[in-house]
Image (cartoon, helix red, strand yellow):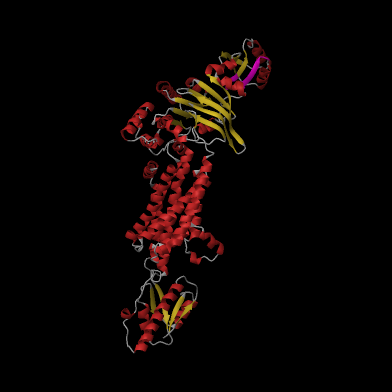
């Protein structure tokens, strides 16, 4: 097994172009799609018809404590006109104990914004109630309220979520390409006869498959890891500290993709046909699985059902959970289980198909 | 040593190999001769335990080879028709890999690689990628890789396809040397009858998945002991001349050649007069006539009505 495994590495080092190309494409796409966004803040005009200038200013200070959104002072007429002219999507109306949004059109930031404003208003109201009950003039929040953070999502802006989705989606998407294209070696070996030559040898088929598949898995894991490391240290994208969880998700995802590769190799007989099939499979899987856009924007039930069948969906879900929501392995059982199950099923069918094809191949 | 009993392979409705019985004794060189598509490769794939037979048996040292393929594989060397090598790797790297697969390692592996490279005449080019080799060199390394573990039985599937005469002779001499000096048992398939005649002690002739004749070269040629082969060279081919030739009572077979016709006819009949008469009648200008002792090609033609390259 190790002889076969080692041979595949020698072959890869002799022709590393494929791997370097897809690693490069991962970085380029992430940089342009996510990196270019930077730490962009979203400006929200605010207005108030009931608050004084000072009260409005206090609210703005409070709302601007987080850097994700920048709340600026404006007036009703101006924001109404801007929204009417479609120059702004929404604005925030401030009142003493409630708020309102003027919304001109749907925007993906609104739900995060509402959540954030609601949180600030709730906190302020609780503090006021406590202050009134105990007759205290001013409360130092840090002394009385234990803020327990259960995950990064609550703190993560939609911009951050989008950025991470691109990073994860592109890293997984291009790894699919690398793995599947490398796996065409298997079909090529059957065509050139080296596979048959190995079958004649005392090497068992199990060892032969194990040596090959282990190589493809390791290449996939290394490519994703390398991409994430480069993005972490050169582009400055944070992936949190859940290294174990991220590692497990990557391994399970790569296992599922290698298994998908086995299925394709079993179904498609020639390397030439695979050159056509691989981009179709990889791209449609990425589209359906949410690597190009978040599945939250998809409403079609058929597309959502198909997404459930795509390993990349669970890869993204698991990685996002580990990175943005600090989820532990036990909380990530759903994507991990789905990936392993998909992998086992596809691998079983794939190897059977390949063996059935082999049974009809002579020297 | 190695034998097949009623070996049959069916692919859906097509029977590729039908009830083939053959055997190889230790140290023998046996040829499997037949045109493309005769079922030679399928037969040796089953013998080499690559392709499971639909029915029939492969027996190695009186045990079922398919029940314990590893026993046969340890002593078997198979040279496939294709260049089954990693072309981006050098000859040395290919040999090292395949040697390791057969359990060779360390100094023994290095020694065997050196010996085989020397035997196939590629020591000088051992570090070059196989893809840079000529067709003949690729064929030689394709054989060399198979010899690393010193197999007792060598199965070769048309190992000289598509190479120049010089490389072909080199390979044939090498195989003969391996068989005669080192006692390696050889099963050699080809559709080149000259190769089989030159190399093999016994020959099986295959057509349409069946063995249609077998024996030593002389035994097979004796099938045609009552016949002779006449080559007629003509200026231009003539359909009527060919038709009239085949109607002569003594003629059993007429086939068109590049510059004329090959006629198989009963021995002792004076055909030349009739042939010249027919050429006059059909206004076909004969430029030469020669008589030849029968070859395996003629035997195949006699048995099937087709040439090996049809």
Q: Is A358 in front, or is B144? A: A358
Give above or below for A112 relative to A210. Answer: below
Left or right side of A267 for A320:
left
Left or right side of B228 for A308:
left
Quadrant where the image shows the N terminus of chain A: top left
Give above or below for A200 relative to A92. Answer: above
| Residue farthest toward the bottom in the current orientation of the protein | A135
Q: In which quadrant of the rendered view does residue A67 lie?
A: bottom left
Q: Main secondary structure of the magenta part?
A: strand
Q: Is A102 in front, or is A158? A: A158
**Magenta stretch encompasses residue B259:** yes
Q: Let me know if residue A73 appears in the view.
A: no
Q: In percent of the image, x 56 and y 62: which residue is there?
A: A302
Give above or below for A117 relative to B51. Answer: below
The picture places residue A286, in percent across and down from the top left corner, at: 48, 57
Q: In which quadrant of the rendered view does residue B242 lie?
A: top right
Q: Which residues are magenta?
A: B249-261
Q: In percent of the image, x 53 and y 36: which residue is there?
A: B52
The picture places residue A39, in percent across and down from the top left corner, at: 36, 68
Q: Let me know if residue B250 appears in the view.
A: yes
Left or right side of A95 for B209:
right
The picture places residue B257, in percent across and down from the top left corner, at: 58, 22
Q: Is A154 in front, or is B74? A: B74
Q: In which quadrant of the rendered view does residue A330 lie?
A: bottom left
Q: In percent of the image, x 50 and y 77: which residue is there?
A: A84
**Magenta stretch encompasses residue B166:** no
């Amino acid at each position: 097994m190790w002889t076969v495994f080692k041979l595949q590495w020698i072959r890869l080092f002799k022709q590393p172009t494929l791997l370097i190309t897809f690693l490069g494409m991962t970085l380029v796409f992430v940089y342009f799609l996510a990196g270019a966004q930077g730490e962009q803040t979203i400006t929200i005009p605010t207005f108030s018809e009931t608050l004084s200038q000072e009260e409005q200013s206090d609210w703005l200070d409070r709302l601007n404590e987080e850097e994700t959104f920048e709340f600026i002072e404006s007036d009703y007429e101006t924001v109404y006109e801007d929204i009417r002219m479609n120059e702004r999507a929404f604005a925030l109306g401030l009142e003493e104990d409630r708020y309102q949004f003027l919304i001109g059109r749907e925007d993906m930031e609104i739900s995060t914004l509402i959540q954030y404003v609601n949180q600030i208003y709730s906190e302020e109201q609780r503090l006021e109630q406590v202050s009134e009950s105990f007759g205290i003039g001013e409360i130092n929040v840090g002394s009385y309220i234990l803020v327990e953070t259960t995950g990064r999502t609550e703190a993560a802006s939609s911009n951050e979520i989008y950025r991470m989705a691109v990073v994860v989606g592109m890293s997984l998407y291009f790894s699919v390409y690398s793995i599947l294209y490398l796996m065409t070696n298997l079909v090529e070996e059957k065509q050139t006869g080296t596979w048959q030559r190995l079958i004649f040898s005392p090497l068992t088929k199990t060892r032969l498959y194990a040596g090959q598949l282990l190589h493809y898995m390791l290449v996939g894991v290394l490519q994703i890891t390398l991409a994430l490391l480069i993005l972490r240290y050169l582009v400055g994208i944070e992936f949190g500290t859940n290294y174990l969880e991220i590692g497990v998700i990557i391994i399970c995802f790569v296992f599922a993709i290698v298994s998908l590769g086995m299925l394709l190799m079993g179904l498609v007989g020639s390397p030439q046909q695979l050159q056509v099939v691989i981009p179709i499979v990889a791209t449609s899987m990425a589209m359906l699985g949410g690597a190009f856009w978040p599945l939250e924007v998809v409403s079609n039930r058929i597309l959502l059902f198909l997404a459930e069948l795509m390993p990349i969906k669970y890869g993204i879900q698991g990685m996002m959970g580990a990175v943005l929501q600090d989820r532990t392995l036990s909380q990530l059982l759903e994507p991990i289980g789905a990936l392993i199950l998909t992998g086992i099923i596809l691998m079983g069918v794939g190897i059977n198909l390949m063996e059935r094809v082999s049974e009809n191949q002579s020297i | 040593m190695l034998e097949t009993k009623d070996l049959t392979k069916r692919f859906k409705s097509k029977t590729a190999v039908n009830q083939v019985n053959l055997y190889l004794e230790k140290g023998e060189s046996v040829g499997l001769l037949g045109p493309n598509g005769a079922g030679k490769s399928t037969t040796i794939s089953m013998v080499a335990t690559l392709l499971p037979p639909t029915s029939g048996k492969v027996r190695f040292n009186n045990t079922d080879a398919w029940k314990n393929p590893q026993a046969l594989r340890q002593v078997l060397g198979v040279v496939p028709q294709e260049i089954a090598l990693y072309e981006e790797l050098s000859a040395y790297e290919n040999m090292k890999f395949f040697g390791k697969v057969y359990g060779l390692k360390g100094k023994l592996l290095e020694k065997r690689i050196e010996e085989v490279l020397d035997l196939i005449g590629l020591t000088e080019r051992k570090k070059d990628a196989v893809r840079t080799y000529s067709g003949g060199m690729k064929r030689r390394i394709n054989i060399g890789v198979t010899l690393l573990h010193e197999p007792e039985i060598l199965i070769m599937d048309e190992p000289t396809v598509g190479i120049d005469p010089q490389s072909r002779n080199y390979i044939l001499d090498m195989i003969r040397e391996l068989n005669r000096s080192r006692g390696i048992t050889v099963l050699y398939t080809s559709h080149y009858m000259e190769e089989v005649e030159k190399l093999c002690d016994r020959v099986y002739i295959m057509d349409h998945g069946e063995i249609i004749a077998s024996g030593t070269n002389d035994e097979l040629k004796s099938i045609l002991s009552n016949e002779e082969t006449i080559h007629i060279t003509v200026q231009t081919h003539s359909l009527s001349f060919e038709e009239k030739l085949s109607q002569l009572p003594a003629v059993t077979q007429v086939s068109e050649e590049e510059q004329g016709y090959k006629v198989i006819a009963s021995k002792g009949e004076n055909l030349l007069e009739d042939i010249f008469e027919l050429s006059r009648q059909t206004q076909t200008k004969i430029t030469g006539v020669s008589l030849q002792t029968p070859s395996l090609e003629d035997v195949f033609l006699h048995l099937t009505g087709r040439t090996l390259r049809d």
